[in-house]
Image (spheres, coloured by chain):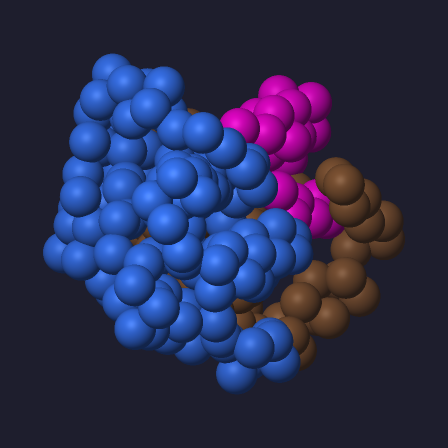
Chain colours: A blue, B brown
Amino acid sequence: MSEDNIKKFMFVNRKAPYGTVYALEALEVVLITAAFDQDVSLVFVDDGVYQLRKGQQTKGIETKNFSPTFRALEGYDIEKLYVEKESLQRRGLTEEDLLVEVTVLDSAAMGALMDEQDVILSF
Amino acid sequence: MLHIINKSPFGHETLATCFRMAQGGDVLLIEDAVYAATPGTALESLIKAALERFNIHVLQPDLDARGVGAEIIEGVHAVDYGGFVDLVTRNATSQSWL
């Protein structure tokens, strides 16, 4: 695909996993977008940061644990994962609590990154 | 009475409204509300203050699913599904704050 056809896609995740279906649905759309060789960024803000929490064990609630998929994204050339610093701090979390490598940005930097995008999809 | 909360305390007023209105009794945190029971958050003081008026319970399988089951705020009781049923039967009325 020529460079001209590549757009910058940002997926904004603001919901915790399992309580609603948003997080899982976002991940499905992300994988579809990757198949079209687009420039994909994933952003985790507010309760969205909980999607990346280490140690999820969903057997007790009989729900599929989709968190390992975040570690597989690299294989789909999705390597831009951004987490808002303020959202982590409010929840008492640090990068060490997350199951995948991310770039931590403050609110202003996250806003600037949003400004650079061609397409933003919010979940 | 038993108050059942299933919304995250971040971005939802549900838990705060329950604490404001309810006059005591049991509160059970389930689904995305279990994050309220985790220590070190900006809301820990809200929970600790509420513990003086309520018996606060949290559903362990929902903590485990979210990777936050290792540690909960002191004074909050973890329950399994059997404990959930016990809370419902022990109280004459239950309210789910949807």
Is residue B22 one of those drawn in magenta? yes
Q: Count of labels shown?
A: 0
Q: Nearer the viewer, residue B53 or B60?
A: B60
Which contiguous range is marked in magenta?
B1-24
The residue at 56%/77% (across/down) is A64
The residue at 75%/39% (across/down) is B97
Left or right, A78 with respect to A21, comes to: left
Q: Nearer the viewer, residue A46 or A105?
A: A105
Res. A50 in view: no
Query: Residue B7's spot in the image, x, y percent?
Result: 61, 42
Is residue A80 one of those drawn in magenta? no
Question: For residue A57, which quarter of the picture?
Answer: bottom left
Left or right, B19 with respect to B70, comes to: right
Left or right, B22 with respect to A98, comes to: right
The residue at the far right in this view is B92
Quadrant location of the N terminus of chain B in the rendered image: top right
Question: For residue B23, which quarter of the picture?
Answer: top right
Quadrant location of the C terminus of chain B in the rendered image: top right
A40 versus A21 height, above or below: above
B18 versus A115 height, above or below: below
Q: Nearer the viewer, residue A33 or B90?
A: A33
The residue at 18%/38% (across/down) is A104
Res. A84 in view: yes
Query: Residue A62's spot in the image, x, y percent?
Result: 62, 80
The residue at 40%/44% (across/down) is A6
Query: Residue B56's spot in the image, x, y percent?
Result: 52, 48
A123 versus A117 height, above or below: below
Left or right, A15 with respect to A50, comes to: right
